[in-house]
Image (tube, grey):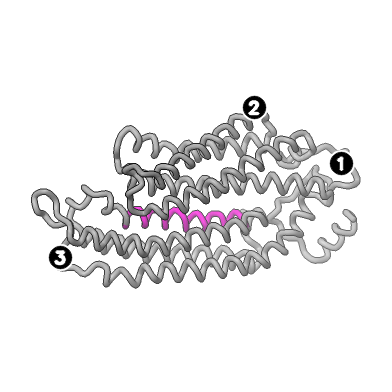
Amino acid sequence: MMKPETRLKWSFIGVATIQAITILALQGAILTEYLDWINPVVYQVPTSYVVPVTFAVSTIGFLFQVLLAIDSCLFNNKIQIWMQCLINICLSVASGMQYFQTKSAAKSISTGYNQFKNPFINTDKLYWKITGPMAIACIAVAIVGSICIYVLAFFLQIEFAWSVYEHISADTKIRGRHRKFSAYLVFLKVSVLLIILFVIVYGFINVHYVQPEFGLTMAIMPIAIIHAILASICVKREYLPGMIVVITFHIGAVVYLVTRLLDLYGTGLKSRTVMKEEMALFACFSLAFISASIVAAVICIFNFGQGLKPLLLGRSSNTASPSTIDFTNPQHLGITSDASERSSKRFEMD
């Protein structure tokens, strides 16, 4: 069974895990207090979904960070650990936004009634005085987690650089092609996360069950996951027709996000919504990573047939050129060699 083999790797995974557990515990407590505070009639207004949506966004975002951390350390993915720094910053900013959004939502529904004069909340409970400090703690944990992840990523990228040299190739061209392939996969993973977070907020808060748009919006999540899986298969197997379809879907996602941003900042009804800033944050980050995915996908297509496919599929001929490592029995990137073995292999490759 593969597992991280250095203290740095364990520390990186540990920080992401502790961050996720702490924030999920705090968000869970906030949600529990909220459910005890409100009455069922409150669900008639979109504002009542702010706290549950905040919990869903935090849960998905920080658990995804844990999975990415494990993946990064097992596969020695230098690009991915830096992307995790950006994701954590994005989630930290979102945590700050959520504090003010939750506070505003609590104030709004605390004075609300339905048409039968039934109150939205249990007036005997002081919700925000209990949960306000918890929301501040979430921001603090996310910021500290971002700092720790950045520091560990700085040292890990040095450790990962050797593994790429040792287990991929001494040939700079092969390493460059592999780097672009890895970058595309990282952009795929991150863009899937961000578009899912956007869809959750946009669907439950802004669309708010209006059909058929709500159903179509929710369908984006499984489509995005399936698309990412197919994209990774096509690029790994260098299947050109499949990559053309993949890029077409990337472009479709860009068009969709641009139109949603125009709705949010237009003059229509959907521009007057709560959590507008958080929707814009996830939409803009999604646009950036999907655009990067399109560029990386095109570059990968131009690298088709340039010797990377046998390496990615675990196959290679026995007639490797002197400028490349023998790939007939490739090692996994997560395997760490001792110092004497590294020196010997570096001498042979040089």
Q: What label does residue 123 carry, if any?
A: 3
Q: Residue 138's spot in the image, x, y percent? A: 41, 67
Q: Earlier in the sequence, mark 1 or mark 2?
A: 2
Left or right of 173? Residue 272 is left
Q: Which residue is mark 2?
A: 241
Above or below, comparing residue 108 to residue 175 in the picture: below
Mark 3: which amino acid?
Answer: Thr
Q: Residue 109's spot in the image, x, y percent? A: 22, 58
Which residue is located at x 18 percent, y 68 percent? 125
Residue nearest the viewer, comparing 181 with 276 = 276
Q: Is residue 19 magenta?
A: no
Which quarter of the image is occupied by the C terminus? Answer: bottom right
Mark 1: which amino acid?
Answer: Ala
Mark 2: which amino acid?
Answer: Pro
Which residue is located at x 80 percent, y 44 percent? 327
Magenta stretch, residue numbers: 51-72
Q: Which residue is mark 1?
A: 320
* Main secondary structure along the magenta-highlighted residues: helix
| Mark toward the viewer: 1 or 3 | 3
Above or below, comparing residue 244 to residue 93 in the picture: above
Q: Residue furthest left?
A: 116
Q: Residue 31's spot in the image, x, y percent? A: 30, 60
Crowd tier of the residue under label 1, counting other residues whose Cα lies within 10 Å: few below 14, some 14–19, many 20 or above: few
Q: Residue furthest top?
A: 241
Crowd tier of the residue under label 3, counting other residues whose Cα lies within 10 Å: few below 14, some 14–19, many 20 or above: few
